[in-house]
Image (tube, helix red, strand yellow):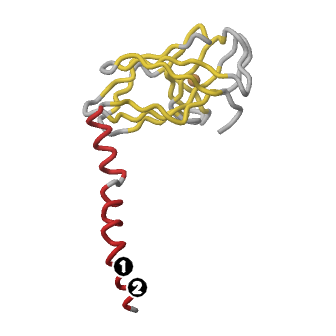
């Protein structure tokens, strides 16, 4: 190693260490202290008036306590439920309502195609790609959260 490179390394190393301190792990701890439930990657499927739509998102519990997703609603539909998809006896995929779901501190709850989702039942108006939709999520500990999500055909 040339002397020049050696000196450069000595100069740069402390900077790398500083960057290391700003790693995602310490950021996560700060978020947990701040106590947020983070809602990310949300979207809804298009649907015709009177029919259904499915809503998907990621819920990250960055609080220091478990929280429970206790209910959902939307002004875009007569009814909204949390559903899970499962394989029926005949191998057909089916879905059923999930009354509530606990999210441990630091855990993520993924609502995604083929798994958990929010079902919007009897849409008051048709939803088309490019529209947006309001969804209310009720958390037992941190309260109600409103999120506005894009309607899109696929993710
Ligand atoms: Cu469903």
As drawn, the residue found furthest toward the bottom would be 2
Q: Residues within 10 Å of mark 2 (few under 14, many from 20)?
A: few
Residue tagged 2: 5
**Place of residue 108 in the rendered image (x, y in percent of width and height, measured from the top left):** 40, 38
Left or right of residue 153, residue 71 in this image:
left
Residue 34, x across and y down, in percent: 29, 33
- Along the line of sight, the residue nearer the viewer: 122 or 46: 46
- In percent of width and height, residue 62 lies at 34, 36
Location of residue 77 by image quarter: top right
Does the residue tagged 1 have its C-beta within 8 Å of any atom of ligand 1? Answer: no
Cα distance between the residues tagged 1 and 2: 6 Å
Instruction: Give the class, few, some or many, for how many residues have Cα within 10 Å of label 1's Cα (few <14, many ≥20).
Output: few
Q: Secondary structure at mark 2?
A: helix
For image coordinates 51% across by 24% down, the residue present is 83
Q: Is residue 96 above or below residue 25?
A: above
Residue 9, disc: 1
Ligand 1, seen in the image, is in the quarter at top right
Residue 72 position within the rendered picture, expressed as x and y whole percent measured from the top left: 48, 17
Q: In this image, 104 relative to 116: left or right? A: left
Q: Secondary structure at mark 1?
A: helix
* Quadrant of the snapshot with the C terminus: top right
- Measured along the vertical axis of the image, is residue 146 above or below residue 152? above
Number of labels in the image equals: 2
- The one of 14 and 55 positioned closer to us in this rendering: 14
> Residue visible at 49% across and 22% down?
82
Residue lying at 70% horizontally and 22% vertically, measured from the top left: 131
Which of the 4 image quadrants contains residue 44?
A: top right
Circles 1 and 2 in contact, beta carbons < 8 Å: yes
Name the quarter where the N terminus is drawn: bottom left
- Compared with 124, 132 (above or below) is below
Report which quarter residue 113 is drawn in.
top right
């Amino acid at each position: 190693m040339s002397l020049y490179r050696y000196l450069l390394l000595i100069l740069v190393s402390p900077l790398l260490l500083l960057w290391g301190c700003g790693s995602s792990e310490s950021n996560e701890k700060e978020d947990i202290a701040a106590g947020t439930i983070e809602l990310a990657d949300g979207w809804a499927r298009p649907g015709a008036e009177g029919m259904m739509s499915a809503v998907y998102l990621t819920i990250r519990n960055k609080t220091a306590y478990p929280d429970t997703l206790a209910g959902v609603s939307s002004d875009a539909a007569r009814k909204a439920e949390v559903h899970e998809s499962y394989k029926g006896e005949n191998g057909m995929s089916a879905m059923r309502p999930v009354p509530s779901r606990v999210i441990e501190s630091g855990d993520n709850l993924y609502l995604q195609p083929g798994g958990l989702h929010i079902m919007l039942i009897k849409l008051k108006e048709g939803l088309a790609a490019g529209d947006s939709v309001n969804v209310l999520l009720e958390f037992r500990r941190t309260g109600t959260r409103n999120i506005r999500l894009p309607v899109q055909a696929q993710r």
